[in-house]
Each structure stands twice: as structure tokens, then as C-alpha cells.
Image (cartoon, rainbow, N blue to C red):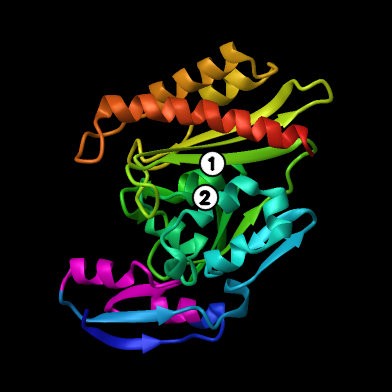
Amino acid sequence: MPVVEYKVPENIDAAVSMLSNTKLSTKVMAGGTDLIIQSRAQSSDPLVVIDIKRIDSMMTAAIVDGGLHLGPSMSCAQLTARSDIKAIYPGLVEAAYLIGSTQVQGRCSVGGNLCNASPAADTIPALIVNGAECVIHGPKGERTVAAEDFAVGVGRNCMEQGELLTRIQIPAPAAKTSDAYLRFIPRTEMDIAVAGAAVSVTLDADGTCTAARVSIGAVATTALLVTEAADALIGTKLEDAALNAAAAAATAASKPITDRRGTIEFRRHVVGVLTRRAAVIAAQRAKEK
């Protein structure tokens, strides 16, 4: 990894200027847990590393009007230790907790997981079902992109030259709303998802689902928002028929590959099972609110 320059901006404008005003390849260091691997695989060309961890707003999280403003560089260890955030978004917190080992948790971040745009990223489906929006700053100003539109391919996100993810905004959930995230891995821990599913549901006073969002990961080139699975849950009391229909919709929407970690058929089946189970957990959490 032949680093030519290591830069540490003190604010967002400085970071955007550094990203914009160089002809060399640049890498943003949010946590840095994947940076060396990515840089070694890239080439031996000169590289500028821009460390954004000294920008205060990138390292903090705040509950604002019942919703969450999350700094993209806040470590997962800090995030998962926040009981106030876990109480509102338990599925997102459990997804963040699954990234890497205890040591990695001290550096990795939700923003880094999002920007890496891995199809198997754990936090992306959890962000999607919570209606997260990605605030991006660049030379042309600020723009906002829905979490489901942020990743555009394997390892590729929607940001253009000079742009920087500066905040993840998650709206306040409605009353009796909660989420859950589940994944399947071959090992007991520290592995990449073979399939993942996140579900958010809203229940009314008699337990009928009035709103839902379902997202699946590791079964397509990007995490998918599966509206058909959500539609199968809405208007029901999440009986077996509705849960099975949601599972079938998730299976139908998936477009996995076969590799050493799982076959197409296995991944399609498992993602349906995970969707059903996550819906049950999310509903139970919503009932308890």
C-alpha cells in the first residue's frame, strides 16, 4: 500500500476539498478495517489516505426529534453500547454488532460498512428497513440518497468524485414499530453473511400490521428492498399464511450466486426462512413497546 500522503481534515469542507483537488487515487479512512486489504488489491499506484476521524460530527450520534443522526465514522463498539439507540432501533444495533471481532468493533463503523457496498454488508438491510437517508457533501453542495439507493453494485456506491458521506439520518419510528435483523453464516461468529434479512413492522392496537419494510442481503449484487414481502405482512396479524407469503416473496426477489459458501438454491431458501423469523422477532418487539 504505497501511501503518498496521509491527510487529516478538521472539518467537512476541508475533507471535500482534499477529495476534490487531487489527481491521485484517494481512500477515505472511516474506520480503516478494510482499507489495507482494499488498497493492496487495487494496485501499486500512489494513494492519498484521508482520515476523517477528527471531524467531530462524523464521530457522534444523537437522537433528534425521536430519530437518529448517526456520524458515519462512529465505531460500532460505541454505537452498540448506546442503550438509547438500541431501544429505538434494536435490529440496526444487532446488525452493527455482527461486524467483525471485538477488536474490529473498536474501529469499524456503519458508515464504512455502507460505503464499502458489500452485497453481504450486515447494516445495509437494517438501514433500509428503518428508512435511513444518506447525507452526502461534495463540490456541488449537499444531497440526500435513500439507503436502498446508496449501493449501486458490488463494492460500488453512488458517490461521485469529491463526495463524502457525512451523516446517516434515520427517522423516528411510528408507535408500536420495531425492527430485527438476522443472518446465516457457516461458522458461529466472525464470518460474512450467506444470506441476511431485516424486517420492520408497525402494529395497531389489536396487533394488525399497518406498515412494514423488508430488506434482504447477500443474495444479490446489492441489498434489496422487497416491497412484495412487506405487502404480504400488511393488513394481517402476522399469521403463518402471511409469514409464509413474505418468506416466499423474499425468496422470489433474491438473485444469488453459487460459490464455496452456498448454492443458489440454498441461499434462496435461507433468505426466506430468515425473513419469516425476523418478522416474528420484530413483531414481538413492537408489541412490547
* Residue 141 in sight: no
Front residue (pair 260, 228): 260
- Is label 2 in contact with label 1 (beta carbons under 8 Å)? yes
Residue 239, position in %: x, y? Answer: 64, 15
Q: Residue at x 25, y 34 (%)?
A: 257
For the residue marked with disc 1, what is the amino acid? Tyr
Residue at (64, 35) in percent of width and height: 282
The residue shown at (40%, 76%) is: 19
In the image, taking residue 126 as reference, residue 286 lies left or right, namely right
> The residue under label 2 is which amino acid type?
Ala
The one of 277 and 120 positioned closer to us in this rendering: 277
**Residue 252, visible in the rendered structure:** yes
The secondary structure type at the circle numbered 1 is: strand
**Which residue lies under the disc numbered 2?**
95
Taking the view exactly as shown, the residue that stands out farthest to the left is: 44
| Location of residue 62 by image quarter | bottom right
Which residue lies under the disc numbered 1? 181
Alpha carbons under labels 2 and 1: distance apart? 6 Å
Residue 83, how many percent across, how many down?
A: 71, 59
Residue at image position (35%, 49%) is: 192
Residue 41 magenta-highlighted: yes
Residue 210 numbered tag: none
Magenta residue span: 15-43
Which is more N-terminal, label 1 or label 2?
A: 2
Number of marks present in the image shown = 2
Viewport quadrant of the N terminus: bottom left
Residue 270 vs residue 133, the one in the foreground: 270
Q: Is residue 67 magenta?
A: no
Q: Is residue 156 above or below residue 197?
A: below
